[in-house]
Image: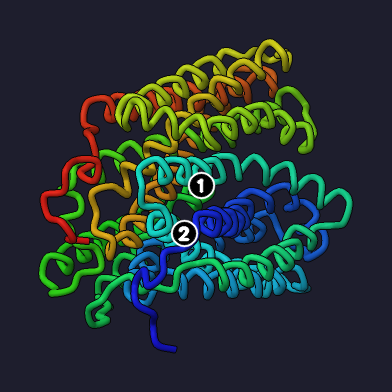
């Protein structure tokens, strides 16, 4: 089917907001799948006879392919059309979800999870580009990105809640099969509502060497990180995998400097806001992973909460993020720009993590969990929107998919690396406390405290980067090159 001309007909305002709803529903399905499976792992292990070491691949297979294909997915959207890639990604994700739900062997489940990761990477990489295409005015774009930011920021904790509910009532296959009606509805609505314009008007050229080296590099980096705690961070296997990832990344940089049509034009990182937002995003993702995972472990392992109670514990923060992301954040951005809200929100999040780190072993929800949760929800609600807008600002329209893939990769790698480092340090602190004769619960608590404090440091450094280096987007100034997009 021949591509239609870009922006042949401007979509009706109501159609744009309906399209945003559909896009966010598709992205939510992807985000949920990163955490919804965690609650069901004990049931999956019992039904399919997984060992402790092999069970981790139910999660790792998804993370490996998701992290590896983000950049390639974004570039393919620029070359072949964002709508086309979004529809293909939703289709593949839905079919893979069906295969996961019907899996009766370990191999089938792990392979289906890997396909889910590839499809999820494609959907995540092109969704931001479609939003930037649908919403052109600064006010509408800020509101739309606020909604998208809320979906990304709160999806993890919603996944924990849904995972506990579905696994407890319908069994573990339900966490995958629930994607079937959602995926079908998103596909039908996307076909009708999303713009069919192609990302690029020139000849289709894909940097195959660059795509291969960066995809393999990212996959090896994710594998080295997720396997590091089990294999040992200084083991030959971990050092070899991470070393290969670094060498492949270096080869990728050399290739990108020499090819005529690079997968990632390195000049993108000379754009100040793009570089600043991605640098802050790496640290912010590490802090967010510390919040979601470490605080959940604290509530479950120290306070004795059930998975359902842990999900409900995140609910106040989610509601606060919703209030900001679905309206208040856009007003703040329109009034104060990107720099001050981003720095202030990250600073609030740093304060919330530092506060959470002070929670005692016998903490109460009202005194030691709810207040820092509210502060974290406030910080995330304020910061996430301007960070995403900054990461997508100043780039040409035909490279929006690439910019989306870059920022998603920054979040993914920052979160994975940050969580691995924090988990390793927390485990070392806990082991030292146990060796010193401390009771098990108190030893766990000391490890979690350290991880949360370091997460607070990550968020504070991200706030400082935003405050010092962010500037007003080029798009907000008088156009120097009219029609350049």
Q: Quadrant of the N terminus?
A: bottom left
Between residue 235 and residue 99, name the one nearer to us: 99
Question: What secondary structure is found at the residue carrying circle 1?
Answer: helix
Is 358 left, or right, of 108 in this rendering?
left
Residue 269 vertical placement versus 422 (above, below): below
Between residue 398 and residue 140, name the one nearer to us: 140
Q: What residue do we see at 41% from left, 46% from top?
A: 141
Dot 2 or dot 1: first in sequence order is 2
Q: Disc 2 designates what residue?
A: 127
* Mark 2 and mark 1: Cα distance apart in space: 9 Å
Q: How is the image coloured?
A: rainbow
Q: Can residue 238 be seen at all in this image of the molecule?
A: no
Q: What residue do we see at 29% from left, 24% from top?
A: 464
Q: Position of residue 478 (x, y in %)?
A: 16, 43
Q: Position of residue 447 (x, y in %)?
A: 55, 25
Which residue reaches farthest right? 169
Q: Alpha-carbon neighbours of circle 2 within 10 Å: few (<14), some, or many (≥20)?
A: many
Which residue reaches farthest bottom? 1
Q: Disc 1 designates what residue?
A: 148
Q: Quadrant of the C terminus?
A: bottom left
Labelled pair 2, 1 in contact (Cβ < 8 Å)? yes
Is 365 left, or right, of 190 in this rendering?
right
Is 413 left, or right, of 470 in this rendering?
right
Instruction: Determine which quarter of the picture holds residue 48.
Output: bottom right
Instruction: Determine which quarter of the picture holds residue 389.
Output: top left
Q: What residue do we see at 85% from left, 57% from top?
A: 171
Q: Position of residue 332 (x, y in %)?
A: 42, 27
Q: What residue do we see at 56% from left, 27% from top?
A: 377
Q: Alpha-carbon neighbours of circle 1 within 10 Å: few (<14), some, or many (≥20)?
A: many
Question: What secondary structure is found at the residue carrying circle 2?
Answer: helix
């Amino acid at each position: 089917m021949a591509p239609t001309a870009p922006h042949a007909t401007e979509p009706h305002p109501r159609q744009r907001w309906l399209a945003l709803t559909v896009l966010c529903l598709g992205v939510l399905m992807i985000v949920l799948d990163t955490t919804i499976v965690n609650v069901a792992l004990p049931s999956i292990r019992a039904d399919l006879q997984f060992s402790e070491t092999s069970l981790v691949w139910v999660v790792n297979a998804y993370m490996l392919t998701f992290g590896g294909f983000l950049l390639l997915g974004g570039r393919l959207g620029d070359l072949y059309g964002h709508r086309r890639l979004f529809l293909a990604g939703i289709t593949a994700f839905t079919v893979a979800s069906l295969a996961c739900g019907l899996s009766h062997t370990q191999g089938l489940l792990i392979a289906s999870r890997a396909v889910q990761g590839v499809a999820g990477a494609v959907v995540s990489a092109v969704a931001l580009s479609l939003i930037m295409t649908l919403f052109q005015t600064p006010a509408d774009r800020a509101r739309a990105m606020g909604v998208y930011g809320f979906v990304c920021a709160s999806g993890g904790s919603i996944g924990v809640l849904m995972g506990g509910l579905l696994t407890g009532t319908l069994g573990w296959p339900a966490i995958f099969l629930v994607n079937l009606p959602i995926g079908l509805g998103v596909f039908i609505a996307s076909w009708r509502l999303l713009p069919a314009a192609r990302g690029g008007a020139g000849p289709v050229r894909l940097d195959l060497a660059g795509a291969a080296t960066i995809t393999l590099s990212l996959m090896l980096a994710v594998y080295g990180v997720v396997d590091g705690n089990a294999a040992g961070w200084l083991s030959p296997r971990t050092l070899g995998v991470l070393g290969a990832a670094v060498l492949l990344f270096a080869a990728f940089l050399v290739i990108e400097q020499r090819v005529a049509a690079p997968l990632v034009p390195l000049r993108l990182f000379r754009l100040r806001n793009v570089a600043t937002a991605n640098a802050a995003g790496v640290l912010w993702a590490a802090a967010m992973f510390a919040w979601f995972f470490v605080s959940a472990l604290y509530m479950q392992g120290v306070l004795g909460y059930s998975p359902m109670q842990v999900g409900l514990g995140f609910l106040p923060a989610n509601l606060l993020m919703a209030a900001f992301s679905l309206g208040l954040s856009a007003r703040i951005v329109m009034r104060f720009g990107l720099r001050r809200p981003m720095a202030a929100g990250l600073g609030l999040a740093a304060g919330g993590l530092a506060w959470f780190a002070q929670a005692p072993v016998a903490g109460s929800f009202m005194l030691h969990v709810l207040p820092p949760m509210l502060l974290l929800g406030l910080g995330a609600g304020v910061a996430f929107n301007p960070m995403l807008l900054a990461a997508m600002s100043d780039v040409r329209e035909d490279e929006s998919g690439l910019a989306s893939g870059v920022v998603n990769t920054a979040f993914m790698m920052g979160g994975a690396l940050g969580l691995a480092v924090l988990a390793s340090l927390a485990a070392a602190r806990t082991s030292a406390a146990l060796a010193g004769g401390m009771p098990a619960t108190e030893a766990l608590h000391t490890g979690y405290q350290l991880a949360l404090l370091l997460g607070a440091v990550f968020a504070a450094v991200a706030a400082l980067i935003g405050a010092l280096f962010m500037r007003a987007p080029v798009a907000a100034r008088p156009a120097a090159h009219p029609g350049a997009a």
